[in-house]
Amino acid sequence: MFGKSFEAYLREQNLSENTLRSYIFSVEQYKNLFKKVNPKKITQYREFLIKNYKPQTVNLRLIGLSKYLKFIRKEKLIPKLVKDQRENFLQNVISNDEYESLKKSLEADKQEKWLFIVRYLALTGVRVSELIQLKIEHVIQGFADIQSKGGKTRRIYFPIELQRDTIRWISQQKRSDGFLFLNKSGSQLSTRGVASQLKHFAQIYNIEETVVHPHSFRHLFAKNFLDRNGDITFLADLLGHESIDTTRIYLRKSTEEQKNIVNSIVNW
């Protein structure tokens, strides 16, 4: 193991907790497989990853190892990433109908907090790690500047109707500052807690579990934005993507959308 110094090095980069843990795991995995750090062993690790994981995971592990190689000043050994042959469709994305159904169910059961959480995820494109950082003060000013991946600041805008509804909701609770979403003990929500509760609601409201997860609503926001606006460069800025290539995935249709289009036009 490498002690706490590498973790401290990563924390200086303001990475999300999940990303930080993933990078640390990558180095731990490498060191469990290979005792030495040299070109041959790194190549063997890369081959091991390609054989056992999907390209996206392979690259995540290699980036984690690359961070460590920079940390120990062996940048020349940084391995090349693999080409990610992405699918030409989106998977596990909640539809607008499912989103509306979920909102109606939450409203009927008076689950106000979770109704707002779902709306914030779907109407702002916020990541769950950013969602739990939102504060009442942000809502009042109409936007939030949040430290995002790589230590960069991302501005999250709140649509006016969402802002008004939220201010009315927090006024009823007689709250004027602090984290917007709290757990039962009055503390900041956790990302795991949000994901777990959304899964629970999917089960009790009979919605496909695979589409009710925090990132699914970010997909929904992106797809709806492009359908109504079409400015992919602006969307990339709103989502906090460093490369517009990352944003292009939202130009693709979901498998259900593809099927419906084919069924509607192929009649020859």
Image (cartoon, rainbow, N blue to C red):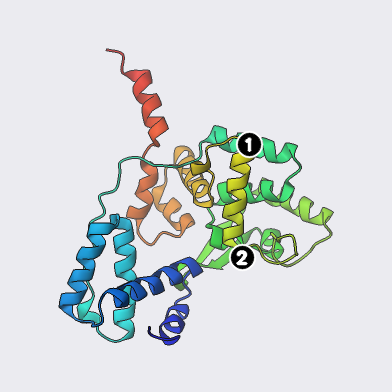
Between the C-alphas of marks 2 and 1, the distance is 28 Å
Mark 2–mark 1 CB contact (< 8 Å) = no
Q: Would you call the spot at circle 2 few (<14 residues within 10 Å), some (14-19), or many (20 or more)?
A: some
Q: Can residue 11 be seen in this view?
A: yes
The answer to whether 31 is drawn above or below residue 136 in the figure is below
Quarter of the image containing the C terminus?
Answer: top left
Residue 101 — which label?
none
The residue positioned 38% from the left and 34% from the top of the image is 255
| Disc number lying in front (2 or 1) | 1
Query: Is disc 2 placed on a helix, strand or loop?
Result: loop
Residue lying furthest top? 268
Q: In this view, does 76 lie to the left or right of 116?
A: left
Q: How many labels does the image show?
A: 2
The percent coordinates of residue 237 (x first, y second) are 45, 57
Please report whichever mark, 2 or 1, sits nearer to the chain's N-terminal start: 2
Characterize the local packing of mark 1: few (<14), some (14-19) or many (20 or more) Cα atoms within 10 angstroms: some
Question: Looking at the rendering, which quadrant does residue 52 occupy?
Answer: bottom left
- Numbered label attached to residue 205: 1
Q: Position of residue 77 (x, y in %)?
A: 21, 78
Q: What element carries label 1?
A: loop
Three-letter amino acid code of the residue under disc 1: Tyr
On screen, residue 265 above or below 134: above
- Considering depth in this image, is 162 or 263 the residue closer to the camera? 263
Judging by the rendered image, the residue that carries numbered circle 2 is: 133
Of residues 11 and 238, the one nearer the viewer is 11
> Picture quarter containing residue 179?
bottom right
Camera sees residue 66:
no
Q: Which amino acid does label 2 sit on?
A: Gln
Q: Residue at x 47, y 79 (%)?
A: 11
Image-quadrant location for residue 91: top left
At x 42%, y 46%, the residue is 231
Quadrant in the picture for the N terminus: bottom left
